[in-house]
């Protein structure tokens, strides 16, 4: 078993419906993602998952100097940011890619699959 | 070349993929499999020259590569632990659903052509791991820097390991899509050899087309019931059969209609036709519907059945393009269909179809328009179209052909 990070990307400016086109779509995406999360738990893939507050709420800290330097905003300026992520346990990349496809459909976003370095 | 050298080349051709694949399965490490197989062949060159070719050369290579791998793993005790874990992982049958066909070489092909790898990486990795080409040979074939190709292969192997790309034949429900991915890699290798896009390269390179055919033959032998694999093999054979007739002594592209059909390779055509007939019979018996490669093979079978271009059954060609267009509504298919339709309904009808296509950046679009306009006697427009086609075409033989055609236009 290997662990994979599945990150969901979405627009930096989320707008009225949290980045979704309408309230119905937002509600449906939450419901679908909830069902997908339940499936991850039932089938034993689940490690952790959660959605993130908008990137504008992020703070960057550089503690390498004598005094920590604190900067408002995300580390990288971008039109799209990570909006949430899953950490899953999967036997191989093929399984992870299939789960990512289902997760992407559920949350209505592109998903980046990346293995953790640890064995 | 000595008999021993010839034997080594022959064994390299037949056994390389088998040995790499078997080692990869046993040790769960593509890097190790590739290195130890290469080393076994290097040892063979030395030993066989001194002691003669062993009675079973393939087994000799396998044994030598395996021994070298085990020796290396014993020496690297730190690595040994990881390898033992890898071995357990790969040899645990419960850990992986069984694919429909179990062959180490097929596993290797599916791993090298995995959709999570970039297309260039799949091509380089397939040619190296399955085809047994050296990094220098691959770099030369694609006019790339050797270091760049080497890096690409190393990165792909690291990703396979780190991301956990599995070493197995996909499950039945995933097989058609994954076979499609493998065929796309093989077709790209073939096409690069057949119509090199690089002006600095020879127009047609038999080394690459030959390698693509060899790999496709292997996949066909491993998946004989797959219609699209048979279709791609037939398509390649029927295309390869015309290779020598396709470029003139002066290095100019010779179009299908102007080729010396006596120079076509009759054996390759017979083999291609037999594959197409077998697929037609299978489809008639209800075993699947013809996909893209089978239809392209059938179109090429119609062309290669005509002893003279005037004997070509154009209505059959157009009917096959209709089927293809239903499957693949791309403008490139529509363009090729229009070329065939010009023979049936005349250049005016074809030109009306071509003018509707959104292919302004594609040299074949302008070459087709130029030819149709020339046949309609519209020289001024034809010249403009030839100019644009020449500008966009990369292949040297094609540029030579288009230039001659343009310069033959009667000024009006």
Image: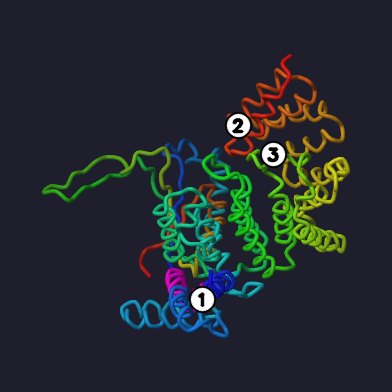
The earlier-in-sequence mark between 1 and 3 is 1
B194 shown above or below B374 = below
User: Which badge, 2 or 3, comes first in the chain's sequence?
Assistant: 3
Q: Which mark is in front, 1 or 2? A: 2
Give whichever of B139, A74 is nearer the camera.
B139
Determine whether, in the image, residue B374 is placed left or right of residue A82: right
Which disc is residue B201 wearing?
A: none
Residue numbers of the magenta segment: B20-39
Q: Quadrant of the C terminus of chain B?
A: top right
Q: Mark 1 points at which residue?
A: B25
Residue B332's tag is 3
Report in which chain the residue with disc 2 lies: B
The x, y position of residue B118, in whole percent, is 50, 53
* Chain of the residue displaying label 3: B
User: Does residue B369 appear left or right of residue B76 in this picture?
Assistant: right
Element type where label 1 sits in the image: helix
Principal secondary structure, stretch drawn in magenta:
helix
Residue in the image at 75% along x and 61% along y:
B227
Mark 1 — on which chain does it sit?
B
Residue B147, quarter of picture: bottom left
As for residue B253 lying within the magenta part, the answer is no
Instruction: Identify the element where label 2 is drawn.
Output: loop
Specify the label residue B361 is tagged with.
2
Please provide percent x and percent y for residue A27: 55, 46
**Image height of B358 relative to B279, above or below:** above
């Amino acid at each position: 078993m290997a662990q994979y990070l599945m990150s969901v990307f979405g627009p930096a400016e989320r707008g009225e419906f949290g980045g979704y086109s309408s309230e119905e779509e937002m509600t449906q995406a939450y419901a679908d993602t909830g069902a997908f999360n339940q499936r991850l738990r039932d089938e034993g893939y689940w490690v952790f998952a959660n959605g993130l507050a908008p990137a504008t709420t992020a703070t960057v800290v550089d503690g390498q100097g004598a005094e920590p330097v604190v900067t408002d905003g995300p580390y990288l300026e971008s039109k799209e940011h990570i909006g949430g992520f899953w950490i899953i346990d999967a036997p191989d990349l093929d399984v992870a890619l299939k789960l990512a496809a289902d997760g992407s459909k559920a949350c209505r976003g592109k998903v980046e699959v990346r293995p953790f370095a640890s064995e | 070349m000595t008999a021993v050298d010839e034997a080594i080349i022959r064994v390299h051709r037949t056994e390389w993929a088998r040995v790499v694949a078997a080692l990869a399965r046993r040790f769960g490490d593509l890097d190790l499999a590739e290195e130890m197989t290469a080393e076994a062949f290097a040892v063979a060159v030395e030993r066989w020259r001194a002691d003669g070719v062993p009675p079973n050369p393939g087994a000799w290579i396998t044994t030598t590569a395996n021994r070298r791998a085990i020796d290396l793993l014993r020496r690297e005790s730190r690595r040994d632990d990881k390898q033992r874990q890898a071995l357990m992982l790969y040899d645990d049958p419960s850990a992986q659903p069984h694919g429909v066909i179990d062959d180490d070489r097929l596993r290797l092909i599916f791993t090298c052509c995995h959709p999570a790898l970039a297309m260039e990486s799949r091509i380089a990795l397939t040619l190296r791991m399955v085809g047994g080409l050296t990094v220098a040979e691959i770099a030369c074939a694609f006019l790339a820097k050797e270091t760049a190709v080497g890096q690409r292969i190393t990165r792909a192997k690291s990703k396979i390991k780190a991301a956990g790309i599995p070493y197995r034949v996909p499950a039945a429900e995933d097989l058609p899509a994954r076979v499609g991915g493998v065929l796309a890699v093989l077709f790209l290798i073939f096409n690069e050899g057949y119509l090199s896009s690089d002006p600095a390269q020879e127009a047609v390179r038999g080394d690459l087309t030959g390698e693509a055919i060899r790999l496709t033959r292997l996949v066909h032998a491993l998946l004989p019931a797959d219609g699209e694999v048979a279709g791609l093999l037939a398509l390649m054979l029927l295309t390869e059969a015309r290779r020598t007739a396709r470029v003139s002594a002066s290095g100019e592209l010779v179009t299908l209609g102007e080729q010396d059909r006596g120079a076509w390779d009759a054996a390759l055509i017979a083999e291609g036709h037999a594959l197409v007939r077998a697929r037609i019979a299978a489809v008639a018996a209800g075993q699947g519907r013809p996909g893209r490669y089978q239809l392209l093979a059938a179109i090429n079978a119609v062309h290669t059945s005509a002893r003279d271009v005037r004997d070509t059954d154009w209505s059959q060609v157009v009917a096959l393009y209709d089927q293809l267009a239903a499957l693949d509504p791309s403008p490139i298919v529509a363009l090729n269909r229009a070329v065939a339709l010009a023979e049936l309904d005349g250049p005016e009808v074809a030109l009306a179809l071509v003018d509707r296509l959104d292919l302004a950046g594609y040299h074949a679009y302008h070459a087709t328009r130029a030819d149709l306009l020339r046949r309609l006697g519209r020289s001024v427009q034809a010249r403009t179209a030839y100019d644009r086609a020449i500008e966009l075409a990369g292949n040297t033989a094609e540029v030579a052909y288009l230039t001659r055609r343009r310069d033959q236009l009667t000024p009006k």
